[in-house]
Image (cartoon, rainbow, N blue to C red):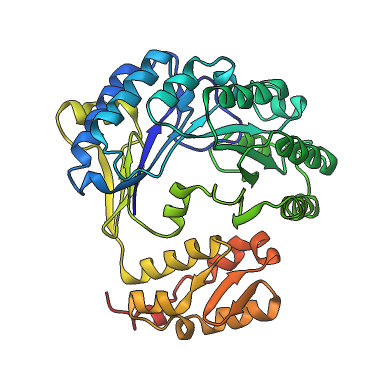
Amino acid sequence: MTGVYIHIPFCDHICYYCDFPKVLKQGQPVDDYLKCLIKEVKKGLFIKPKENCETIYIGGGTPSALSCQQLELLLKGLNENISFDHLKEFSMETNPNDLQDLEKLKIMYEHGVRRISIGAQSFNNETLKRIGRTHDRESIFQAVNNARKVGFKNISLDLMFRLPGQTFNEFTENVSQALSLGVEHLSIYSLILEQHTIFHNLLMEHRLRLPNPDQDRQMYKYALEVLNTNGWHQYEISNFSKEGFESLHNELYWNNEDYFGFGAGAHAYLGRRRIQNKQVISAYIDDLKQNEMPVLRSHQLSLKERIEEEMFLGLRLNRGIDLTASSKKFNVDLLNLYQNQISKFLQEGLIIKEDNKIFLSDEGRYFANDVFSTFLIDKTASNSLTS
């Protein structure tokens, strides 16, 4: 399975928590960027047979911040250069404010987009203001209703918790509101304070008050319980869906499968090689205008790195890792390699083992990053591995 990720780095405003590659759209060479992006797609897909593409994901930034004409330019270019013969999922990230009428939604749908992800984050208007969002509760409802009118039957909402000033009761209301909309998928994330974000700067100045770890944990536990009670399927640490509506593109990442990455700052994984594009938009455009690929760095993964990623990514999924299959894949006995870590987490109740499969417990999912960090292979064990 192979996917295509398309990065649109433009936003109408900058959210206080976001650390993804992005710039304010105003004054940027958006049309030039899109033309160069299509050129990169056309050139890049010769690396691997393009008819194998099964997922497309347009992320950002804010892809829906493009004008209708720009959206047409982008989607028409993708349709002309990517074969849809084997396509199973075509997703696009959106902002509620951009979906207040039907025009952009119709353009998306007419060009093959069938799944949209709406960045709701919260249904509380005061919280939305505190995190730098410009939409409100009503615009989320309007966005979903408009998407349904156009024909979208696969809608995902993003929600966040551990937000400044957020209470447990407010979060439970957010989950309730999301369920009332009847969407097919929910991504629910705890706020992470990344460097170079407005929130991180405020924290360094002691001007940011967040829910404490116990409250954070209580919110996550509530989400697990109420969604399970309502028949939802948790398939990854932060992702929940109705049956059959898992994000195929994101599963491709977690399954460590190949994907192309196009656009400024985009990442790709092809043939055991990780590739990152230049993030500066002017440098990205200049390279493509000179008929060069805008690659910043490329790295062939060692056997050690591939095994580590197999563990990190596989344990994110609720189904976990089949140690027998993964051992065969790498010709390495993973149960023996990681016996100390697995024994420790089994005793602590953070990992569950059934036959030759291991997966995180509910408690383990909350402490997932702590678990993952122990699966780095030390130098002594690394010396026994051969690529």
Q: Residue at x 32, y 17 (%)?
A: 31
Compared with 43, 370 (above or below) is below
Who is closer to the viewer here, 256 or 28? 256
Q: Is residue 191 left or right of residue 327?
A: right
Res 37 visible: no
Q: Where does residue 329 sit, x and y in percent of width and height?
A: 34, 74
Question: Measured from the top left, where is residue 227 in percent x and y?
Answer: 72, 50
Residue nearer the viewer, 288 or 172: 172
At 55% from the left and 47% from the top, the residue drawn is 245
- In the rendered image, the residue lying farthest to the left is 291
Question: Is the N terminus in the top left, top right, bottom left or bottom right quadrant?
Answer: bottom left
Q: In this rendering, would 386 be left or right of 378?
A: left
> Residue drawn 55% across and 42% down?
195
Count of marks placed on residues? 0
- Residue that lies at the very extreme toward the right in this rendered image: 169
- Residue 145 position in % (x across, y down): 63, 24
Q: Position of residue 68 (x, y in %)?
A: 42, 14
Quarter of the figure that contains the C terminus: bottom left
Q: Identify whether 141 is placed above or below 343.
A: above
Can residue 78 be seen here? yes
Q: Residue at x 54, y 50 (%)?
A: 244
- 227 sits left or right of 382 in the view: right
